[in-house]
Amino acid sequence: MGRPLVYKSPMPGLGLSMGITFTMLSIVVLLPIGALLLQGVNYGAEGVWATVNRERVWKALYLSFRLSFYAALFNLIFGVILAWVLARYRFPGHRILDAAVDLPFALPTAVAGIALTALYAPNGFFGASWTKTIAPALNAGLEYPEAALNALIMGLGFEPWTLQVPPRIAYSTLGIFIALVFVGLPFVARTVQPVIHEIEREVEEASATLGASRFHTLRRVIWPMLLPAALTGFALSLARAVGEYGSVIFIAGNKPLVTEIAPLLIVIQLEEFSYDGAAAIGIAMLVISFAMLLVINLIQVWSRRRIGYV
Amino acid sequence: MSDLSHSSPAAPAARFRSPTDEAPLARWLLIAFVTVALAVLVFAPLIAVFVEALSKGWEAAWKSLISREALPAIKLTLTVAAIAVPLNAAFGIAAAWFITKFDFRGKAFLITLIDLPFSVSPVVAGLCIVLLFGANTAIGSWLVGNGFPIVFALPGIVLATVFVTFPFVARELIPVMIEQGRAEEEAALTLGASGWRTFLTVTLPNIRWALLYGVLLSNARAMGEFGAVAVVSGRRESATTMPLKIEMFYNEYQAAAAFSMAGLLAFLALLTLLLKTWLENRHAGELSANRRGH
């Protein structure tokens, strides 16, 4: 009657390996996540909504997801270029660069956080030149385009928009962006690189034989093959950035409504012993994250089906 | 390897460009761009850590590491890693054995559940543990009553660390064990070896490098975890790990002490990378890293 739950096998250790797997999965992952959901259920939908539906929470969620998206997008483009250069070209220093890509995985986030802050603070190595020369020059150059754009936007009846860059990198959204780029850097490169290694040269040769330019081959032959893996890397990078806490809190300045990220709000709620509030924001983050991952998964299925394998 | 054709510096190559290569100018521009970008994004922060850590000299950095404030944090981090990493390795081996040696329904779902911690924010992970084992919950208050507090103490930190490193070993082992199949174990069993003997003498030698690789990644993350541990430690002095101590020093304007500890962790990270690169070069065939993608 029907298929068995576990098929018979001569292999030993079914009970032991299954027991360890399910026990640890339950204690470490399932029960704690269940406790979070239960807290949310007990608090009630209205309670959760009342907690989330405040300006400070919305602003933090918007900031977290918006900057994470930008950072993952940057990593998507840069990661594909990086993977291509590391997989296809041989040059002095290749091995050092290849190893360096993994540094953000190995370096603790708190270390990355204080290091980036030291570099990008207004008196830091990069921060000083930004504050003294780059930002003023950029803002001066952007004055006219901004005026022109705003004349158009306000003519259409919208609020004016600002193109001005912040005068500081650390303690502004730019700093958060840089920290999120750092922690998500390896994902796209590391998922795309093996795929590039597996591309058979014959495919490119065939494309060249048929008269395609190199650029055309890269765009129409190579890129579709890389896209599913690149999207996987993008999703991983995005998930990592949304949840990132350690590196961001040092460089963000953590000003409410301006540079306060969603995970920090959870920590603040917990410090005030507001478990319901913390659970509500945690659940909101989980829901938005999973919705985003689902969308990315669907895009991935679509792009795989389009090029016709796996 | 198929890239012999374009990496050989033979003389005619100067005139004949393979149709599967980019123009030399484009290639050098890309290499220059990637080098500069990695220098700014990755190397600069690393150098900054060491420069700041040694700004007052080796001796001062060393003294701040063996100070009464710093030493307990180093000890706690080592203790946590020494408990969490073996737990993770045991789970990874058991899960990989269960998933690759048996056929059962819901295998894909189980793998998704094992991967779940990767898509949960570490702060949310810490929150989940506080909500399950905190002193205000049924389980938590019972445990505290019996003298075994979890949250704000070592067990909670271990639990949070195991959560964030949960998939590392299993993910590394599963592809390798799928590729190796079951034939060797079946042969050993047919010849009369016991289950444990089969595992220790047949399976383990086949997966040892992949296991080491997973343990290495898991250890690096375990020693460096910040968000999840920050939540469960509740900023108690007795439950402060190295990354948390960095934050405390930093917020107390003891930048030099913060950076010395950061330098120590960065040094460990470099060591991890070195070992990882060595494993990838020497034992590439026995790792799953090079088979991903499909």
Image (cartoon, grey):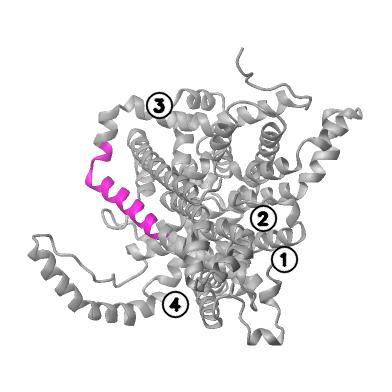
Where residue B247 appears, as percent x and y from the top left, is 47, 57
Q: Are marks 4 and 3 in contact (CB under 8 Å)?
A: no
Q: Do labels 1 and 2 share a chain?
A: yes
Q: Which quarter of the rendering shows the N terminus of chain B?
A: bottom right
Q: Nearer the viewer, mark 2 or mark 4?
A: 2
For the magenta stretch, what is the residue range?
Answer: A51-71
Q: Mark 3: give few (<14), some (14-19) or many (20+) Cα within 10 Å.
A: some
Report the Cα–Cα distance between label 1 and label 4.
Answer: 43 Å
Q: Which residue is drawn at 63% across and 52% down?
A: B217
Report the Cα–Cα distance between label 1 and label 2.
Answer: 14 Å
Q: Which residue is drawn at 35% across and 48% down?
A: A262
Report the Cα–Cα distance between label 4 and label 3.
Answer: 48 Å
User: Dot 3 corresponds to which residue?
Assistant: A38
User: Dot 1 corresponds to which residue?
Assistant: B1
Where residue A57 appears, as percent x and y from the top left, is 28, 45
Q: Are marks 4 and 3 on the same chain?
A: yes
Callout 3, which amino acid? Leu
Q: Which chain carries label 2?
A: B
Q: Which of marks 1 and 4 is in front?
A: 1
User: Dot 2 corresponds to which residue?
Assistant: B290
Q: Nearer the viewer, residue B35 or A57?
A: B35
Instruction: Return the residue found at the far right.
Output: B191
Callout 4, which amino acid? Phe
Where residue B171 appears, as percent x and y from the top left, is 63, 44
Q: Which of marks 3 and 1 is in front?
A: 1
